[in-house]
Image (cartoon, grey):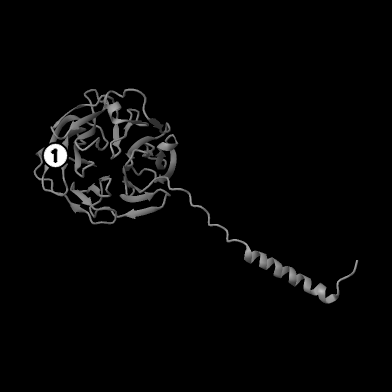
Amino acid sequence: MTALPPAARRAAPVLVALLVAALVACAPEPSPPTPEPAAFDGRLVVHTGRPEPDQLFALDGRGDETPADPPAGGLRWFAAAPDGRLAGVDGDGRILVAEGLGASWLPVSTGEVPAEASEADIRLPAWSPDGRLGVLYGDSGTASALGVLVVDPATDGGLWVPLDTGLGGYPPAWLDASRLGVPTRDSEDRPTLTILDIDVGTGGLASHAGRALAASPDGSTLAVLRPDARTVELWRPAAWLAGAAGAPLGRVVATDAVVVEALALDDTGDNLALGTADPDGTTEGVVAVHDGSDGWSVSLERPIAAGAPIGALGFVP
């Protein structure tokens, strides 16, 4: 074998380095990593309460968090509308509305309300699909549901629909633009869901027992929290109102150690948000979104500080 001249041997490493550099320069740029798909469209607004200071924040479908300011007087109860508006009740019992996250909180004119309502210490709001507020008034001392005040934030005054039943402890939920599902308790202290027809001012017990409701704004789906406070069933409204005829669309069961404190459905009923917590407040709570297209499996989770009740959840654009 013929040996390379000394000059060629000295040049060989340089030639190899130049060749490698040329190959690297010609290589295509690596593609950026594909982001994980969002668990849901829009945002999920979360309200948590004491013993931590009131917190209000929004989660997007990738878990990124946007904080929002509660009213100056605190936020005892809260509801989010499908169009992004927010409603709250402050520490003085005033009903307030904000046009969205970060917007100013402005008082709503309720007009005259009965004396018992003006002294009620529980006021739980819910947005209707057509932009009205239904506020459930209750007395914690007697555990009584006193009635529902229906107000349009754009006008003055409201409609009072009296109730004479036990207080269920969860906020109401609109099934459609005229029917409101109110968590109540019957004469034997069992959790029930009373359906009020606001247009005619009458109501009757729902055909199936339950603790709380959530409805998709498009009217396609109901989420019903069963009396055990752990099981949530998904139904078509007509089937559930007919006595839970047939099988539910799906079911989500929380673990033995927790109860469901809040629930919400997105616009189309494809995503269910649940806030679960230990009743003793000794461990962290969890806000989880369940994907209906994947058997209601968990697609997003966010821990909540131990002992902080999860007051309300709501999907917004």
Q: Residue at x 90, y 69 (%)?
A: 2
Per the image, label 1 sits on a secondary structure element best described as helix
Q: Position of residue 7 (x, y in %)?
A: 82, 77
Q: Is residue 142 visible?
A: no
Q: Quadrant of residue 254?
A: top left
Return the residue nearer the eye: 312 or 16: 16
Q: Residue furthest right?
A: 1
Return the residue nearer the eye: 67 or 236: 236
Say whether residue 105 is left or right of residue 34. left
Say whether residue 81 is left or right of residue 27. left
| Mark 1 burial class by Cα count in 10 Å: few <14, some 14-19, many 20+ | many
Q: Quadrant of residue 310?
A: top left
Q: Residue furthest bottom?
A: 7
**Total numbered labels:** 1
Q: Position of residue 121 (x, y in %)?
A: 19, 41
Q: Is residue 96 visible?
A: yes
- The residue tagged 1 is 117
Name the quarter where the N terminus is drawn. bottom right
Q: Residue at x 19, y 32 (%)?
A: 196
Say whether residue 295 is left or right of residue 157. right
Q: Position of residue 291 (x, y in %)?
A: 41, 39
Q: Residue at x 9, y 39 (%)?
A: 115
Q: Residue at x 24, y 22 (%)?
A: 188
Q: Position of residue 76 (x, y in %)?
A: 25, 46
Q: Amino acid at mark 1?
A: Ala
- Relative to residue 112, is residue 196 depicted above or below? above
